[in-house]
Amino acid sequence: MTLSALNADVIVDQLNAGDLTATDCVQHFLDRIQTHNADLNAFISVSDTALEQAETIDKRRKAGESLGCLAGLPVAVKDGICVSGQPTTAGSKMLENFSAPYDATIVERLKSAGAIVIGKTNMDEFAMGSSTENSYFGSTTNPWATDRVPGGSSGGSAACVAGRLAPVAIGSDTGGSIRQPASFCGITGLKPTYGRVSRYGLIAFASSLDQIGPMTRTAKESALLMSVIAGFDPRDSTSSKEHVSDALTSLETPLKGIRIGVCRDHLHEGLHWEVKTKINDAISVFKQLGANIEEIELPHSNSAVAAYYIIAPCEASSNLARYDGVRYSFRAQANDLEEMYRNTRGQGFGDEVKQRIILGTYALSSGYYEAYYLKASKVRRLIKQDYDEAFQKVDLILGPTTPTPAFKLGQHTQDPLAMYLADIFTVSANLAGIPAMSVPVEPSSTGLPIGLQLQGRAFEENTLLRAAHQFQNETHWHMTSPAEPWRTQS
Amino acid sequence: MEDSVLNSNSNSQSNNRQTVPFNDAKIIIGLEVHVQLDTDSKLFCGCSTRFGEAANSQTCVVCTGMPGALPVINQRALELSIRTGLSLNCRIARSTKWDRKNYFYPDLPKGYQISQFDQPICGPGHLDIQTTEASGQPRRIRIERAHLEEDAGKSIHDESNDRQSSKIDLNRTGTPLLEIVTYPDIRTAAEAKAFLSELKLILNYIDVSDCNMQQGNLRCDANVNLHIPLRGQQIATPIVEIKNLNSFRAVERSITFEAQRQFEGWQENGVTIADAPKQTRGWNDHTQMTTLQREKEDSADYRYFPDPDLIAVKIEETQIKQIRSQLVQLPAILRELLVKEYNLKPDDAAVIVSQGRGVVDYFLTVADGCENSRVANNWIGQEVLRHLNESNQTIQQYPVSHQQFTELLKLVIAGTLDQTRGKEVLNAMVEHSISSEEAIKQLGIKSVDNSELVTLCETLMDENQNVVEQIRSGNEKAIGMLIGKARKKNPNANPGLVKAMLSKMITG
Ligand SMILES: [Zn+2]
């Protein structure tokens, strides 16, 4: 078996056993990036210190030092997360030449566990998008069908794990940006509970919705990464002090008797027929595992996309005000201050970002604030109440991650609404702050991956990971990789 | 036809306006005071708040608005705000939250200021100020709210060469400010000044801010307009906000100027609050005038919304109780104490209290020790304060301890030292940092016994027989001449005792 076929937990075991050196491991993935990134465009930048870090790990291991639980494991990190001394662009021209002056908390934690950040992955500009087509650095392609999008905004992270350019990756999810690309690329992705993982060092899109999480091939790998990145951070006031228990130890606890809710409404309208079929097949697997399937209702979920597309742009319009050309960002030529602001922001941001800033600015303006921001906040509370009620009856909620498999590059670029509907099943979890993950089910007849979404109670990531892991014990979809060389689907 | 009617109408109104005297106009003043809280670190990051360091040396990823950096509230700033609120009789919020005030400015790194919009940490309160009103009653100025916010940075415009360049210093960015907003209860420029002085004194007593106005640690905006009685109605002139007043004098003078300017403007054009938007004006110290900065149709749209990076702060009753229990006595209480318990005149009490808690304590100890508060007040109010003022020292640096001072005053009160000799002794004590005993020795001051006094008086009478005659013939004042001469012969002789003995010997 080649190194790129191995799961992260196996790689870590081999590194610990001395069967593999960190240097060889990192070199292997750097070589794959070198060979394949031109096709995928999954990475915006590749670390020039990764090999050096690997050598250090090998030396320390040889010297008998005790190392962290990920020592020597290469990890790809979304380019919206700060890695000290590395370019951190958030997919924008605005930060094309920005080198982060500090490590995000999760990067600090990964590093101290011995993980090696091998590169920064492509993304929709400032995480605004569902296809990675809004990146200033060009679209990422889907390794399952190179004429299709990988999803977004964490499209680079999803594509590099699916294409085995990195064993595991880190993404961020504001309205589905981990789960939707995971679904499109046939990998496992977890958006943790809001507050579970520190946002310090994550370039903000919508602060009350953003959350960092793992994007991996297996649920077990996600559990492994969560054991490192989750937990309270005094530098993030919204991070939670809720106790984090080790997900790895509970993965095999039987699912017998677990109550899984299915919202029938989500298995009808607008759903691709194959998505429906494969999700129903997945439900049968859970039944075999001893789960009780129950019907639930989420009456306000049809308003979720509307509320999301008010709240997220409102916060974004303020979060992105700092890119004004005064300090570190791109600065356009101008004769006076006002012109400098106009030119910098006019030239530095892409169309989707500008559109959302305008939308958010409008919605926060006096006279409109109540009708938009406050009303959307009310809807958000109702959505959260729906979940609270549903979780009285069930332990997990199961459904499709997206209404369709990956669409073609350019298919929705002229139709923002169609693009926004790709988030229809994912945004609710962000609005409610609950954890949710996407797990691969059987692909479509044409070989396109399909994702199953599991949502759980706040801070019960372990239940999600446990259910996903045991589903993966029974299935093999997550372990299939696109055949190389990668092809277009049609 | 209609035009002429309008014209005549406005002419007659104009004539009416000309007849109103300025003194009939009521000045309506509300203040917004920005106080820099005396914390070691900034409001949302760990950077130091020290003044005068090299530009941009006290910054970090948080206060320079780097991508991904997040704010964390400084608990000390919350505590100082609560302490201030309690001292201003404010209701302290049980839950207070943070809002973003969005606007673009080069010295505002995030493109928004973290402030408090609808749930300020301190709710309504009041502050009583002393006025010169005949009634002697204090005036109560109501406080609307006090909220915490972060300061912006400083823009430095270099116009020394053709290519004008601007530089930004972010050292001040993120420094905690408490903005105290009054209701428009203030009626004169003097009251505005009195309010600020009292506020500054309180902040000083409770150790919340050093209120150094030169360093911009206390800044004030004044909202001013006039209510003018005209034919049984109150006409209000447009409200003007005078920005960034950096001294008490600027506050007083700008309000006086603005009231006059608004009155003359109204007489000229009759424009009222209904006709014109709120104006922002700046005070120019050189021209002693306010000048138009901007006229806003509506208040600028700052698009306030709750800051999603911060959580609401819950303030527990126990925390408020604890801060309240540690509150020091406020100036008003101490003034009352000095008047009621120490029999000082209100003005004298005000002088002592205005010097700060250290001087008050010094006074109280000395007054208690020498058991004569009037003498203590005279000596401290004049000699000590003059010295502190001239040498720019604090009472803690004053060379004479309260024990030494008490000892000196005891000698004066007992008549052992007269006023003049007493002051000579005090000067020696200050100059050489010595005790009263040592000073007396150094100055050669000895007590004069009765037989010496008798001899002295006899000599004086012999040498000045004509003066003695004058006194005998009823000119009692002439005795002053003898006392003067007695001082020259023996500076230690107590003039009071000399006088008593002389009059006894001369007139029997
Ligand atoms: Zn700082």
Image (tube, coloured by chain):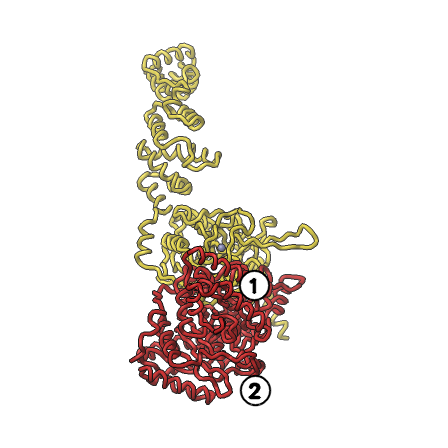
Separation (CA) of disc 2 from disc 1: 36 Å
On the picture, is B366 further left or further right than B183? left
Question: In front here: A113 or B191?
Answer: A113
Does residue B11 sit above or below B393 in this rendering? Answer: below
**Along the horizontal axis of the image, is B449 left or right of A31?**
left
Quarter of the image holding residue A470?
bottom left
Towards the viewer: A30 or B176: A30
Residue B187 shows up from this direction = no
Q: Which residue is mark 1?
A: A87
Q: Nearer the viewer, residue A330 or B446?
A: A330
In this view, the residue farthest toward the right is B162
| Residue B398 point in image, percent of width and height | 42, 33
Residue at the (36%, 59%) spot, across then down: B92
What amino acid is at disc 2? Ser
Q: Which chain is yellow?
A: B
> Which amino acid type is shown beneath numbered disc 1?
Pro
Q: Residue A141: percent from the left, percent from the top?
A: 56, 77
Q: Chain A in the picture: what colour?
A: red
Identify the mark nearer the N-term, 2 or 1. Answer: 1
Residue A490's disc is 2
Position of residue A307 measured from the top left corner of the image (x, y, whole percent): 45, 77
| Badge 2 element | loop
